[in-house]
Image (spheres, rainbow, N blue to C red):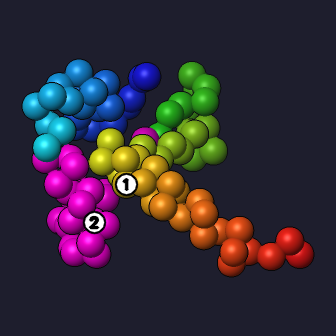
Amino acid sequence: MRSWTRGFSGHFSLSYWDIIEEDIVAAAGVFLQGLSLPKAIFSVSLILILKTDNLATFSDFRPISICKFFNIIITKIMVKCMAHLLPKIISIE
């Protein structure tokens, strides 16, 4: 998996999972309990990638939002926790 995040990428995190696992699981537990986490954990980087070689206007950039690794983990946990609830609160109509 290729990551363009600043800081530690998913690849780095997975490579050293045996070292960081305890901290990541503890932070996820804090989140699930509804306690506050430092705002920096949920920060997102906005990267502008050139569409063409000749930069003339802002439309020559492609903006890409890059989430940090922990943000992705929390999102996946939330999806799994809410999957059984969504059919009950969203009608067919």
**Where residue 20 sits in the image (x, y, percent)?**
14, 37
Q: Is residue 82 visible?
A: yes
| Side (left or right) of 30 relative to 60 | left
Q: Is residue 39 visible?
A: no
Q: Amino acid at mark 1?
A: Ile
Q: Amino acid at mark 2?
A: Phe
Q: Relative to 88, is 20 above or below?
A: above
**Where residue 55 sits in the image (x, y, percent)?**
55, 33
In the picture of the structure, the residue carrying the numbered disc 1 is 74
Q: Relative to 35, is 8 above or below?
A: above
In the picture of the structure, the residue carrying the numbered disc 2 is 31
Q: Residue at the far right: name it.
A: 93
Q: Quadrant of residue 56?
A: top right
Q: Relative to 93, is 67 above or below?
A: above
**Where residue 2 sits in the image (x, y, percent)?**
42, 23
Q: Which residues are magenta?
A: 23-47
Say whether residue 38 is magenta.
yes
Instruction: Describe the element under mark 2 as helix, strand or loop.
Output: helix
Q: Quadrant of residue 90?
A: bottom right
3D distance between C-alphas at marks 2 and 1: 8 Å
Q: Quadrant of residue 61?
A: top right
Tag 2 near tag 1, CB within 8 Å: yes
